[in-house]
Image: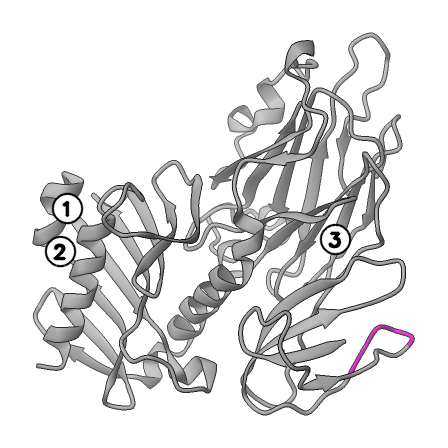
Amino acid sequence: MNLRRGINNRTGDVYRNVMADEEGIAYLQLEPGMYTVEVIKTGYETTFYTISVLRDGMVIQVNTTPILNDDEVRIILTWDQNPEDLDSHLFTPYDSSSEDTTYHIYYSNKSDANLNNLDVDDIDGYGPETMTINHLGNGLYKYYVVDYTNSSNGNPTSYDMSYSNATVDIYTSAGLIQTFHVPMNRSGVVWEVFEIRNRRIVPLQRYYNTLDKENTWWEHNEYEEIYDEEEIIEDYETDSSTWNMKDDIQYIRDVYAYTNNHIKSYEKFDATSEITDYVFDDSTLIKAVIKNDLDLEDIFDGDVAVEYYYGNPDYSGVNEDKNNLIFAFVTVDKKEEYRYYFKEGKIIRYIGPDHVEHDFEGGESIYDNGGLGVSEVFAKGMLEVEHCFV
């Protein structure tokens, strides 16, 4: 493994090099900061991960996968320690002309008649849990992740999975082609991630907080082969460029989780009865909470609450541009949710109430059509910085 300093630094000078042992474990002493790990192994895909080193004794997991043949697809699920057991569920095209009923692959039924299979079932946190489609055919495939830990304990409204940093990577013979991240701050135990329709990956990103079987796709779908011969796509295609934004999005998600987990350690200022600011080191605004944002009510047509998140040097351990707005979470009438991911004053991801991710590779001007209220939300977030330090 090669390590380089910085986020998504794939070509810079190698800072450290280390070999893993027979169990795939490597030990390193590193200064606090952000690093890019390049994983290299003969016969495997070369993969890159951005990691954050915060303290001694950290355990960081990185993965790779054997190089695949044409028409092979591998789906890899990873997550943090909690919840301990997340399960992969893959529904493969149902062939009504046969008596095959093994089109639902999961821990109790690890393969189907076409030898698509669950390779690894992990039950004690982190993963990886892997699924392999050995010969991608036409028709409809669907992939879900289920929080078995909480669903089996009768806790369908748990937030654990949404805070688990669960990530789904999709590999083909072309390498890593798409990455999905679990929606944040959502109660539920079922994450409907994506489908493959006629060899085309379609993001879904739906989330369920009920165990009512009548509301789940597999209870009312007929599993018919749904495709038009004229629309078959011979090459693997994706509907978004999520995978090549992985490091920027993961960094924002990590800052979000770290800030909330350590929120009691920061200075808290109640600017008004409606606005609370959290400050690090007396000079850096890292979070602002507005309980009732009257300025945004006309934009969203309802009662608006907003959480703003800024670059947090307490997380990264390195100097950052102060008061750098990276994320905004908007709730309208306590039910509709909007998420905005920012980098260097540009929108890089927008997620509306439908939970569909809209990505803008390289960033897009906040004044362009990047989603509802982008420019207004960004401007209000930066205005909060000015108010905080006046």
Task: Residue at 88% x, 79% y: name it.
Answer: 21
Mark 2 neighbour class, 10 Å CA radius: few under 14, some 14 to 19, many 20 or more: some
Q: Which residues are magenta?
A: 22-26
Three-letter amino acid code of the residue under disc 3: Glu
Mark 1 neighbour class, 10 Å CA radius: few under 14, some 14 to 19, many 20 or more: some
Q: Which residue is mark 2?
A: 292
Instruction: Return the mark for residue 129.
Output: 3
The percent coordinates of residue 14 (x first, y second) are: 68, 82
Task: Residue at 48% x, 53% y: name it.
Answer: 158
Classify mark 3: helix, strand or loop.
Answer: strand
Q: Taking 332 as reference, is 344 left or right?
A: right
Task: Residue at 23% x, 48% y: name it.
Answer: 367
Label 3, label 1: how many angstroms apart (C-alpha)?
41 Å
Could you tell which of marks 2 and 1 lies nearer the N-terminus? 2
Task: Residue at 21% x, 51% y: name it.
Answer: 375
Q: Which residue is mark 1?
A: 303
Q: Is residue 6 above or below residue 83?
A: below
Could you tell which of marks 3 and 2 lies nearer the N-terminus? 3
Task: Spot the residue most to the top.
Answer: 97
The percent coordinates of residue 296 (x first, y second) are: 13, 49
Label 2, label 1: how many angstroms apart (C-alpha)?
7 Å
Mark 3 neighbour class, 10 Å CA radius: few under 14, some 14 to 19, many 20 or more: many
Magenta-colored stretch includes residue 388: no
Three-letter amino acid code of the residue under disc 1: Asp
The percent coordinates of residue 264 (x first, y second) are: 33, 81
Q: Are marks 2 and 1 in contact (CB under 8 Å)?
A: yes
The quarter of the picture where the N terminus appears is bottom right
Three-letter amino acid code of the residue under disc 2: Asn
